[in-house]
């Protein structure tokens, strides 16, 4: 509990201040004069804070503050006066009083100042304690610099990392307990006093010694080096991988270099096992999804072809078999196109482009869907227009882009919804808006929509490649894509194509 000393020659003020501060949990001591307060401090009575009146009979509050400042005691003093003036304020500042408050004292102000003063004192006490500890350690280092290992044993042996110190001649002068265990040395003398080259393999030695030399050539205390996946050698000639952090410093005029070595062999093995497991799980999901897509199409084709091949098959059945075959073939072609598109993640400078008419390209894609009955039960709302809306792109890539969006829209509406297609030219840029009244997407789905193989469809009903391919295409051709979607309210895809140069 913080103990506060109140100095005032008026008893009523002392009691009033005590009542206010006691209610806040502080321990309060009272003194009727600065002289009495000094006697108590010289008698080694400790306080966290002093609140003193300035004008008192005998020694003033300014005199008391001067005493504290000259003794260099970490004891904040809050001065209170009923007659504030420039002279007393200047004296308060000169002798480092923490705060200068005028009477009558406001309770809220007083409590706020007291709290801040105690926080400052506690911080200074903590800093002083750390400084004293630091000075104590420094004295220990200076008096025991012939045995750096013993000086730091309590700290260094508490870590599982190897901590090795070398001098400017590359001789190992200190190593903690973990160093002997990590490098499998039975006796400290097998390591201490040896050249640091002992820790490197012959074929890697020159590479790492060049890096170590770069630290040694820098001014001490200003150079650090981080080395990852370093191959180190144990005393039995076995090797392991380690991460090393090296720092330099000066001690009694000599330069030293300390390296913290962490064995990452197990970590690397665990990471590789995790990556291998995730890769296998990932490939299993992808293979299952794509395999179901292909098997579904092949099953439909095989079934209808077998029925159409029977002697009693009528013309209607054969016609239906032909349409199903074409439809499933188109589905497999789209799947193949998406898979092939995965290899085009970087824009090719040799991509063949030309100025196309947006309305004409949309008509071509819709005609293909009509022939293959892909959107047979969906209602396509599109006003035919002869207006030419130019944009520069590859025709096949645009067809793949639009096909993926239309197929997703059809799936979102269970193949019975309404899909609206709108085009227009604005500021010399072609705009394409595709809207559906399907189930829409949540914010979580929107954040993952471009991830490869991410799909909200059941296994075998989607590969998760559609929007990933769309993202690649829009990036390749600098197309801006804006998506607006909410669960139960459908989705809107707005494509803005770059302005077509007249040249």
Image: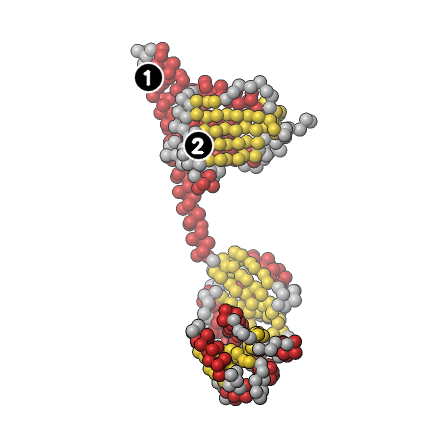
Across and down, in percent, residue 336 comes to 47, 29
Going by the picture, which residue comes out furthest to the left?
312
In the picture, residue 496 is in which quadrant? top right
Is mark 2 in CB contact (under 8 Å) with mark 1? no
Across and down, in percent, residue 69 comes to 59, 81
Q: Nearer the viewer, residue 33 or 10?
A: 10
Which residue in the protein does label 2 denote?
Answer: 490
User: Residue at 55% across / 72% down in the picture?
Assistant: 173
Which residue in the protein does label 1 denote?
Answer: 307
Going by the picture, which residue comes out furthest to the right?
503
Q: Nearer the viewer, residue 502 or 477?
A: 502
Number of numbered tags placed on the structure image: 2
Is label 2 in a helix, a strand or a loop? loop
Q: Is residue 461 above or below residue 314?
A: below
Residue 252 shows in the view? no
Please give the label number shown on residue 489: none
User: How much space separates mark 2 and mark 1, taking CA atoms?
Assistant: 39 Å
Q: How is the image coloured?
A: secondary structure
Q: Nearer the viewer, residue 502 or 105?
A: 105
In the picture, residue 473 is in which quadrant? top right
Across and down, in percent, residue 91 comes to 64, 79
Quarter of the image with the N terminus in it = bottom left
User: Residue at 49% across / 35% down in the picture?
Assistant: 484
Residue 499 shows in the view? yes
Left or right of residue 111, residue 224 in this image: right
Across and down, in percent, residue 238 comes to 47, 60
- Label 2 vs 1, first from the N-terminus: 1
In the picture, residue 501 is in which quadrant? top right
Classify 10 Å Cα crowding around label 1: few (below 14), some (14-19), many (20 and above).
some
Classify 10 Å Cα crowding around label 2: few (below 14), some (14-19), many (20 and above).
many
């Amino acid at each position: 509990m913080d103990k506060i000393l109140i100095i005032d020659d008026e008893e009523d003020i002392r009691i009033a201040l005590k009542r206010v501060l006691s209610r806040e949990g502080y321990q309060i001591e009272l003194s009727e004069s600065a002289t009495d307060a000094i006697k108590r401090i010289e008698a080694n009575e400790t306080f966290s804070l002093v609140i003193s009146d300035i004008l008192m009979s005998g020694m003033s509050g300014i005199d008391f503050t001067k005493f504290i400042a000259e003794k260099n005691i970490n004891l904040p003093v809050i001065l209170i006066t009923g007659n504030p003036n420039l002279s007393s304020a200047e004296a308060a500042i000169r002798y480092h009083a923490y705060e200068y408050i005028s009477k009558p004292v406001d309770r809220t102000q007083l409590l706020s100042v007291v709290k801040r003063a105690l926080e400052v004192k506690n911080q200074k006490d903590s800093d002083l304690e750390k400084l004293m500890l630091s000075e104590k350690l420094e004295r220990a280092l200076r008096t025991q610099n012939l045995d750096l290992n013993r000086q730091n044993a309590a700290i260094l042996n508490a870590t599982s990392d190897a901590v090795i110190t070398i001098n400017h001649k590359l001789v190992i002068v200190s190593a903690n307990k973990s160093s002997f265990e990590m490098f499998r040395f039975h006796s400290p003398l097998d390591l201490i006093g040896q050249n640091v080259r002992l820790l490197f393999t012959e074929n890697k030695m020159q590479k790492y010694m060049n890096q170590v030399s770069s630290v040694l050539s820098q001014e001490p205390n200003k150079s650090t080096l981080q080395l990852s996946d370093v191959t180190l050698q144990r005393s039995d000639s076995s090797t392991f991988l380690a991460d090393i952090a090296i720092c330099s410093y000066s001690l009694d005029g000599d330069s030293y270099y300390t390296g913290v070595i962490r064995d990452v062999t197990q970590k690397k093995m665990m990471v590789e096992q995790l990556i291998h497991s995730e890769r296998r799980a990932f490939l299993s999901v992808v293979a299952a999804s794509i395999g179901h897509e292909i098997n579904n199409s092949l099953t439909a084709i095989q079934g209808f072809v077998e029925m159409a091949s029977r002697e009693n098959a009528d013309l209607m059945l054969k016609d239906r078999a032909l349409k199903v075959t074409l439809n499933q073939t188109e589905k497999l072609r789209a799947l193949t196109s998406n898979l092939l598109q995965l290899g085009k993640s970087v824009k090719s400078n040799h991509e063949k482009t030309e100025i196309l008419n947006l309305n004409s390209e949309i008509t071509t894609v819709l005609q293909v869907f009509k022939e293959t009955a892909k959107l047979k039960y969906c209602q396509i709302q599109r006003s035919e227009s002869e207006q030419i809306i130019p944009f520069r792109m590859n025709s096949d890539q645009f067809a793949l882009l639009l096909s993926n969006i239309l197929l997703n829209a059809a799936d979102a509406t269970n193949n019975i919804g309404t899909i609206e297609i709108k085009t227009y030219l604005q500021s010399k840029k072609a705009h394409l808006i595709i809207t559906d009244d399907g189930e829409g997407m949540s914010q979580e789905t929107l954040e993952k929509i471009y991830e490869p193989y991410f799909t909200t469809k059941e296994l075998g009903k989607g590969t998760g490649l559609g929007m990933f391919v769309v993202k690649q295409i829009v990036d390749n051709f600098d197309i801006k894509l804006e998506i607006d979607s909410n669960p139960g309210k459908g989705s809107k895809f707005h494509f803005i194509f770059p302005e077509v140069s007249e040249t």
